[in-house]
Image: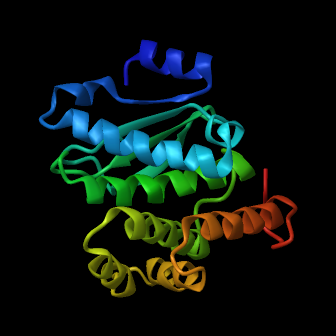
Amino acid sequence: MHMEQMKAVEDDRTWEISGNLSVLPNYSEFKRAVHSVHSRFEFMFGKEIMDKHPLLIDNATCGSGYTPIITPVLGRYLIIKLNIENFSDRERIIFQVSHELCHYVFYSYLGLNRAQADDREEGICSGMSLCFMKLHSADFDNWCKYIQHHDNLAYRSGYDFANKVEFDLQKFSKELKNVLQAMSNNEYGEKVS
């Protein structure tokens, strides 16, 4: 990331997509999908939560390590690294961005120095992705099967969490707010910064 990009993000306490991606094929489709998901999160959780920490959204390259992932950097901002091979694959973009932005919401409620995501959080974030797929995918059943049979057992629990609210995004976000409020009040007995 260029220092001037991060400075702009920090000054505005907002988010942006890495400018390095703009030269890639189908970037405009990628950008529209990312903006669509971020706008929905802002509607559900509010601007204060979605602008709490500066955020840069980037895409992984070969040898980037585990992706997709959200990582706090220097206790000041967050970077989301996606794993999108084809920027015209709108469903995959929405799936990954919604999962990682769900983690961002956890960071907004609990702070950048909080403990790493646990199994419950991974399940919740996978459930969030399924709620988005219900709205945006013609192949919703296959996304459900993908989560239900995921190698990581924590991700599988996302299906149950989303199914409990009938994959309704508004109901899901309300449930998530309740979970986060309880965590920020330390009702789960966890370390919260």
* Relative image position of residue 178 (x, y in whole percent): 77, 67
Residue 95 can be seen, yes or no: yes
Query: 34 or 78: which is nearer to us?
Result: 34
Give the residue displayed 59% in from the left and 85% down from the top.
164
| Image quarter of the N terminus | top left
* Relative image position of residue 41 (x, y in whole percent): 56, 49
Q: Which quarter of the picture shows residue 192? A: bottom right
Query: 98 or 40: which is nearer to us?
Result: 40
Give the residue displayed 15% in from the left and 32% down from the top.
24
* Relative image position of residue 73 (x, y in whole percent): 54, 37
Residue 113 can be seen, yes or no: no
Q: In the image, 154: left or right of 22?
A: right
Query: 55 or 66: which is nearer to us?
Result: 55
Q: Which quarter of the picture shows residue 77? A: top right
Q: In the image, 193: left or right of 116?
A: right
Give the answer, above or below, for where 163 lies relative to 22. Answer: below
Q: In the image, 186: left or right of 139?
A: right
Give the residue displayed 40% in from the left and 38% down from the top.
57
Q: Residue furthest top?
A: 4
